[in-house]
């Protein structure tokens, strides 16, 4: 009997598969029920709260509807909304551009600064905990509040910045009112908050790096810069993925800070603002707003999928 | 979109506590959208002896004023229950509010903005009620309360005109005279500039005050009917007539206060109040920034541009009340609307908030302030009354295309063609009917 199975196995893979399946399902009824519930309930919620609304938005993006009445009032217009948005909507391209500037800026400045601060804090400075909490504090504040704090700083006549620069009386720079510079002024505020977050992520990553690795590098004669670039940073790879994904999401969903400052007008347009402007309000253009939301979704998916695909395909090869 | 906020007294709107609250409320408003249906009529009592009243006058002064005005309605048999919502939020949520469980009687504005919802069948027909109100209102007001189907859907309550405001003391001291034509207006403004004043105060941060400037220039140049047709999407934004308006505006822009996009109207009004600016085009609610100086404040209708139309049109938005489509207490709702149409009720309201005037022709104007008397006069003598850009056109056009188009123009007045093309293109996608 045992011989037979041993001999049979290499010949035909089918029984092996059957055997494996048997093993996989070899769970007691109670376990199956628990597993089913544990998977089923989140799946149900996920489908109900994530997939249905997303697909609903995609469907509505092909319609013209003012949000009044039921399904029978929805007029289907095909890709008209998309065509109009790309060709007739003056706020669309600036908004897209601002979102991309936002993304690049967040990827470069707060990430570098956060990593730098994390490395410094990892060296067990005196009062390290104090610095750490001070730098992380902005993250606790909502972006809306951050926007308000920075409005005080950027105010042309009474604001802190112009007074420090000594330009408050003579020729005050209108940091938030001048459409050429206000996006960068706001980005500084957003980065101020985001840096603390990135710092914390990296700090957690650094704490988990095995000190033996650094010790070994030191024994091999590496200086601290080499140790960091050649040993520590590569080990932080999982953190880098988290940071990237977090930053992309943060950049594309940016909304509250510009909405607090000037409702996202006059140089501070963002896709999220356009979605809100069109969907929420006295008379909404649900189809138009949904089309904008779908464009935003596609951009997010583009970034995330490309990156995850690269990361995982490299990992599989390794 | 965001209309005036009576009693906004924060000396620095950017830094004021009110601004923070407004910001927080706005954010909260967005978060609260899914729960909107629950907002309406949450405290609407099921008993037959209560009428619910949707109130958008959320600032303290007008809120107290409307509360005082409604006090006289309460009797043992019928009581009114006031449900107040933050002013800007009320407007942003009106769509969901009307489709959910609206209050029996609710605040709204006359004009296209009212017709839009009336035509969607979201508010109650008040024609029957109006047959008993006929002589209480001037024909122009009845027209403003009438939808395309010829039925009435609104009971007017208060009204305020737009004009060019100035301080009498400053003008007498410097020997300025009220200009009658555009040329005189420009000459006066140029003189003010030479005298070291900012001729015309201007603020566009809230997105709507510039619409008032556009409206004045438009109906003075092209007349009332063109205003109506343009707002209804029947005229071309790229046409010569609109182009003329923007050319005139461009000529006047150097006489306006700079950096308007970063300023709120309260700040612009204060610059007049401090004698730094010569004049300011706004609604009479500007008086809220002149507390204690009301007697010194005066205004004149925007000067003539095209002799064909003279000064025949005045912009005088009407605030009023509508009835829900299916009020829980229909009888009570009608009684309350009748009560709101009474001159006594309107005067009672104006006692606490004298920044507008009563709409009832029967209202006794002897108690009016000088400014109110003038406002009443200007409205009475006007041949045509407009509401306001954002009340006279499709809200979808006003809130996005118009606001951002005007902002783009103010930011870059040399680029009128691009701005007008953007507005025209959007008008075509919105006014498809």
Image (cartoon, coloured by chain):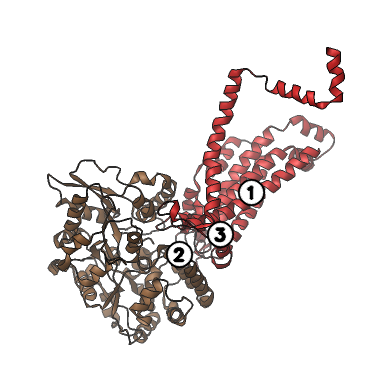
Chain colours: A red, B brown
Q: Circles 1 and 3: CB distance less than 8 Å? A: no
Residue B355, horizontal then vertical, whole percent: 25, 64
Q: Name the residue under label 3.
A: A78
* CB contact under 8 Å: marks 3 and 2: no
Q: Please report whichever mark, 1 or 3, sits nearer to the chain's N-terminal start.
A: 3
Camera-side mark, 1 or 3? 3
Tell me whether marks 1 and 2 sit on the same chain. no
Residue B168 appears in which quarter of the rendering? Answer: bottom left
Q: In the rendered structure, the residue with mark 3 lies on which chain?
A: A
Q: Can residue B6 be seen in this view?
A: no
Determine the secondary structure under disc 3: loop
Residue B111 found in image quarter: bottom left
Q: Nearer the viewer, residue A116 or B350?
A: B350
Mark closer to the observer (3, 2): 3
Q: What element carries label 2?
A: helix
Residue B214 in sight: yes
Q: Name the residue under label 1.
A: A301
Question: Which residue lies under the disc numbered 2?
Answer: B262
Q: Residues under labels 1 and 3: Cα distance?
A: 22 Å
For the point 15% across and 48% down, the residue is: B74
Viewport quadrant of the C terminus of chain B:
bottom left
Given this view, does label 1 or label 2 mark the residue nearer the observer? 1
Rendered view: B188 above or below B200: below
Q: Residue B123's spot in the image, x, y percent? A: 30, 56
Badge 1 crowding class, 10 Å Cα cut-off, few under 14, some 14 to 19, many 20 or more, is few
Check the picture and name the quadrant holding the N terminus of chain B.
bottom left
C-alpha distance separating marks 1 and 2: 36 Å
């Amino acid at each position: 009997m045992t011989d037979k199975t041993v001999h049979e196995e290499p010949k035909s893979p089918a029984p092996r598969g059957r055997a494996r399946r048997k093993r996989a399902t070899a769970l007691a009824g109670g376990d199956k029920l628990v597993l089913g519930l544990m998977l089923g309930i989140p799946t149900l919620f996920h489908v109900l709260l994530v997939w249905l609304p997303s697909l609903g938005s995609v469907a509505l993006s092909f319609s013209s509807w003012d949000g009044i009445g039921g399904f029978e009032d929805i007029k289907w217009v095909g890709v008209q909304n998309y065509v109009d948005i790309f060709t007739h909507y003056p706020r669309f391209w600036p908004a897209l551009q601002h979102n991309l500037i936002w993304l690049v800026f967040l990827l470069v400045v707060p990430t570098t600064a956060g990593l730098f601060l994390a490395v410094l804090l990892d060296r067990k400075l005196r009062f390290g905990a104090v610095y750490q909490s001070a730098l992380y504090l902005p993250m606790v504040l909502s972006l809306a509040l951050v926007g308000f704090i920075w409005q005080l700083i950027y105010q042309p006549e009474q604001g802190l910045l112009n007074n420090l620069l000594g330009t408050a009386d003579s020729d005050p720079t209108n940091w938030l009112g001048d459409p050429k510079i206000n996006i960068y002024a706001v980005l500084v505020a957003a980065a101020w908050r985001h840096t603390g977050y990135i710092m914390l992520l990296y700090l957690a990553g650094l704490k988990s790096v095995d000190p033996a690795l650094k010790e070994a590098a030191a024994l091999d004669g590496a200086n601290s810069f080499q140790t960091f670039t050649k040993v520590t940073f590569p080990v932080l790879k999982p953190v880098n993925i988290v940071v990237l994904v977090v930053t992309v999401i943060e950049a594309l969903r940016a909304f509250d800070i510009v909405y607090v400052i000037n409702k996202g007008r006059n140089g501070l347009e963002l896709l999220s603002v356009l979605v809100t402007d069109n969907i929420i309000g006295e008379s909404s253009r649900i189809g138009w707003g949904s089309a904008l939301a779908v464009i935003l979704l596609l951009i997010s998916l583009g970034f995330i999928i490309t990156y995850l695909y690269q990361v995982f395909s490299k990992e599989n090869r390794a | 979109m965001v209309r005036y906020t009576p009693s906004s007294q924060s000396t620095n709107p950017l830094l004021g506590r009110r601004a923070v609250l407004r910001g927080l409320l706005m954010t909260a408003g967005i978060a609260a959208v899914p729960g909107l249906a629950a907002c309406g009529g949450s405290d609407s009592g099921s008993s037959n002896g209560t009428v619910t009243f949707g109130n958008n006058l959320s600032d303290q002064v007008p809120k107290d004023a409307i509360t005082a005005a409604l006090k006289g309605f309460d009797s043992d048999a019928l009581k009114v229950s006031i449900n107040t919502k933050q002013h800007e939020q009320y407007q942003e949520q009106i769509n969901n509010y009307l489709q959910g469980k609206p209050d029996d009687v609710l605040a709204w504005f006359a004009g296209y903005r009212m017709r839009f919802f009336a035509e969607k069948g979201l508010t109650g027909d008040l024609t029957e009620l109006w047959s008993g109100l006929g002589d209480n209102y001037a024909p122009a007001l009845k027209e403003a309360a009438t939808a395309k189907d010829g039925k009435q859907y609104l009971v007017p309550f208060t009204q305020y005109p737009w004009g060019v405001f100035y301080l009498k003391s400053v003008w007498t001291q410097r020997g300025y005279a009220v200009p009658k034509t555009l040329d005189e207006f420009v000459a006066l403004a140029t003189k003010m500039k030479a005298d070291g004043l900012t001729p015309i105060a201007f603020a566009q941060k809230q997105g709507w005050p510039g619409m008032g400037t556009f409206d004045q220039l438009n109906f003075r140049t092209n007349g009332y009917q063109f205003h109506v047709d343009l707002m209804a999407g029947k005229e071309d934004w790229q046409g010569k007539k609109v182009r003329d308006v923007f050319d005139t505006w461009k000529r006047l822009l150097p006489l306006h206060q700079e950096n308007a996009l970063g300023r709120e109207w309260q700040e612009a009004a204060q610059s007049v109040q401090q004698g730094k600016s010569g004049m300011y085009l706004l609604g009479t609610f500007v008086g809220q920034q002149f507390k204690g100086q009301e007697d010194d404040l005066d205004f004149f209708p925007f000067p003539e541009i095209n002799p064909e139309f003279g000064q025949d049109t005045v912009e005088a938005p009407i605030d009023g009340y509508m009835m829900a489509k299916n009020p829980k207490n229909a009888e009570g709702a009608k009684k309350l609307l009748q009560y709101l149409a009474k001159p006594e009720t309107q005067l009672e309201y104006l006692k606490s908030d004298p920044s507008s005037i009563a709409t009832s022709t029967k209202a006794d104007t002897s108690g009016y302030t000088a400014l109110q008397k003038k406002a009443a006069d200007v409205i009475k003598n006007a041949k045509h009354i407009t509401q306001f850009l954002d009340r006279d056109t499709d809200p979808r056009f006003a809130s996005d295309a118009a606001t951002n188009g005007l902002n783009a123009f103010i930011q870059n007045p040399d680029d009128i063609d691009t701005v007008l093309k953007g507005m025209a293109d959007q008008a075509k996608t919105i006014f498809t009917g």
